Image (cartoon, rainbow, N blue to C red):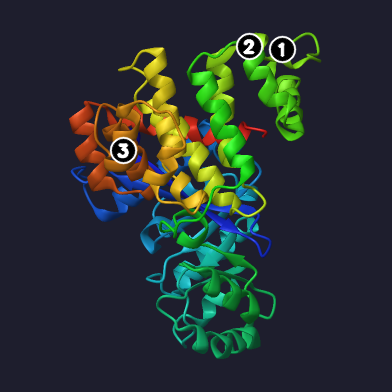
Amino acid sequence: MLEHAYLGRQPILDRQQKIVAYELLFRRHRDATTANVSDEHDASSTVLASTLCDLGAKWVLGNKLAFINVSASMLLGGGALELLPPERVVLELLETVQATPQVLARCQHLRSKGFTFALDDFELNEENRPLLQVASYIKVDIRQTPLEKIPAMLRDIEKFHPNLKLVAEKVETAGEFKACKDIGFSFFQGFYFAHPETLSAKTINPAYENVLLLLNKVRENANPPDIEKFFKHDVALTFKLLRYINSVGFGLSCEIESIRHAIAILGYQQLYRWLTLLLVTAGQATTPAALLITAMTRGRLTELLGQEYMEPRDRDNLFVVGMFSLLDVILETPMDKVLEKLSLPTSVSDALTMRQGIYGPFLSLAEACEAGNAEKIEELAGLLQLEPAKINHAHLAALAWTEAMEM
């Protein structure tokens, strides 16, 4: 069953926009068949167990929690949930789960094992009120429940459970984020943080301009002294380069002290890769962390999806395509204006602007994996002749790579 599941991951952030958890979304292949509904749910929970236990929760989540959707049949049907690491998992009861004696007993049993529960899209009524006995989190869909009605609903909930942590779902604008904070939500989830719309144009600031110019010099194979001059004129760039190459993760036995030595050890290919990451992370002061992580993960996933089809230089371009596909959002500048600042091959520009050319389908597949769009994944997997198991492995590997990066 494992080869017919696809992984999606959406961040959950605190009031400072720091990522504290991920909601994990597993999608079965749309043509997969099972004997009955409970078998399918049991298979899904087995996939969850395999991912978080066999592959390792830290590999997928870093130090974050995992919120996992659980239906009544998954909750009651079999013991696969017990295979999950309870200290890392929040079981998110779907709004369709009813507070039957069997459900409540099962939840209490799992709580005794160390699991915590969230109630998804929760709206208080007499039928579901007993579920508050087992919950630690309440998730409120602000698209379904108008913001002006939420304070009264939360006051009613607090009468029965005053210590619940509140999660606002489907937050899509800065105004909604502020309003939810004012209401009293502690955690937030939605497109505003991880999947925003393209914003209006504005001038790229000098920090980005320096990195863009240096990227072009590296791509043109400029002489090392010319590359070195860029770093000497920018203290922040020099600091980041030396910190990167002297990091434990780079695996050098000696410390690098000069810029020229660092460039020689790193090589132009690795330097170009690092600069693409730096271009994204340079905006950390004003850009939501979840968006930066999405860009990094998308770059790595796009590269991994095409690694068996491409030569090394093309694989580097795949990484750049995935990473740069969110630059219009990060820089608040239309993509065509961003590309005017970059000396990129036509094949890369075609992928970024039209999702066409040799790289376009791989970027589209990475975006479909990110969104958990099983139908689109299936269509593109067939086009690229990629097996579901390879797509799963690439997505998990990309998530793990991003968690391990230290920029």
> In the picture, which quadrant includes the C terminus?
top right
**Disc 2 residue type?**
Pro
Q: Are marks 2 and 1 in contact (CB under 8 Å)?
A: yes
Question: Residue 73: image x %, image y %?
Answer: 36, 59
Marked residue nearer the N-terminal end (3 or 1): 1
Give 218 or 377, whichever is nearer the viewer.
Answer: 218
Q: At x 39% / y 56%, what residue is drawn?
A: 74
Q: At x 62% / y 32%, what residue is drawn?
A: 404
Q: Tell me the tag on residue 260.
A: 1
Query: Is the residue 277 above or below the residue 202 in the image?
Result: above
Q: Secondary structure at mark 1?
A: helix
Q: Tell me the tag on residue 14.
A: none
Cα–Cα gap, marks 2 and 1 = 7 Å
On the image, numbered disc 2 is attached to which residue?
A: 224
Query: Would residue 270 be found to the left or right of residue 245 on screen?
Result: left
Mark 2, Cα crowd under 10 Å, few <14 / some 14-19 / many 20+, is: some
Q: Look at the image and tell me whether residue 59 can be seen.
A: no
Q: Viewer-nearest of labels 3 and 1?
A: 1
Cα–Cα gap, marks 3 and 1 = 39 Å
Q: Secondary structure at mark 3?
A: helix
Query: Would residue 207 be found to the left or right of residue 32 on screen?
Result: right
Question: Residue 351: image x %, image y %?
Answer: 31, 35
**Disc 3 residue type?**
Leu
Cα–Cα gap, marks 3 and 2 = 37 Å
On the image, numbered disc 3 is attached to which residue?
A: 365
Question: Residue 66: image x %, image y %?
Answer: 55, 50
